[in-house]
Amino acid sequence: GAVVSQHPSRVICKSGTSVKIECRSLDFQATTMFWYRQFPKQSLMLMATSNEGSKATYEQGVEKDKFLINHASLTLSTLTVTSAHPEDSSFYICSAFTGTEAFFGQGTRLTVV
Amino acid sequence: AQRVTQPEKLLSVFKGAPVELKCNYSYSGSPELFWYVQYSRQRLQLLLRHISRESIKGFTADLNKGETSFHLKKPFAQEEDSAMYYCALAGGLGTPLVFGKGTRLSVIA
């Protein structure tokens, strides 16, 4: 199957700093990628839909100025958590759609201290 | 509104016993339904989708529109089936998936 790679898999940052998470489709082009957030022992919550070459579509309640999404190419979408706070600590997962199926990255564990 | 409900957080069964993971959904149109599985320390991966009507690793799931259910079944559980299972819904091709809260299946030897 297709491969979606996320980097980094784990990151610790200080409160107030920004963190960038990359999501790459390694062997296919993805015009659409999705970003999810997963709290401990809870389900994946859709944060935004990332569209190549255009602005991301954010779900209700997700601050677009805090969670900046850029999808500059057909194989890369980035999520930047700006001015991170401890409550932003979570597991972030990206997904890329091949046209017939969605594939998931391995996730990024963000800890804000 | 789209919603997926998995009523069981944890399901424990003995090896060789039948398994049924429940999933109910709420959607106004004709959704696509999926089951995803996450084995320990691995990423989420597709197990099966209702439009394929296939059996993967012995698992099957039938879409029941009348009951708005998409339960996952396997006649004989194996230890390697122990994992987290998520039921998901999509409103159409390429639209984002809406996930249930997941059910952790534990198969006891």
Image (cartoon, rainbow, N blue to C red):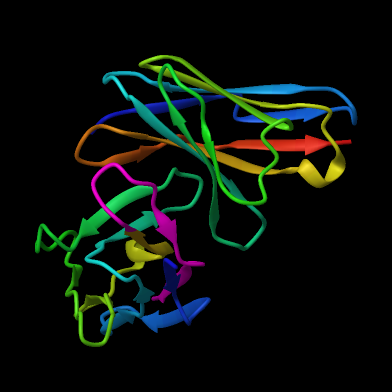
The magenta segment is B90-109
Which residue is outermost to the top? A73
Q: Residue at x 26, y 20 (%)?
A: A28
Q: Quadrant of the N terminus of chain B?
A: bottom left
Q: Residue at x 44, y 60 (%)?
A: B99
Q: Is residue A47 magenta?
A: no
The image position of residue A106, as x and y in percent, is 49, 36
Q: Quadrant of residue B47?
A: bottom left
Position of A47 relative to B102 (above/below): above
The image position of residue A78, as x and y in percent, is 56, 22
Name the side, left or right, on which B73 lies relative to A104: left
Q: Residue at x 41, y 32 (%)?
A: A33
Q: Nearer the viewer, residue A3 or A19?
A: A19
Q: Residue at x 66, y 31 (%)?
A: A10
Position of A39 relative to B104 (above/below): above
Position of A5 relative to A48 (above/below): above
Name the side, left or right, on which B97 lies relative to A113: left
The image position of residue A50, as x and y in percent, is 47, 30
Q: Quadrant of the C terminus of chain B?
A: bottom left
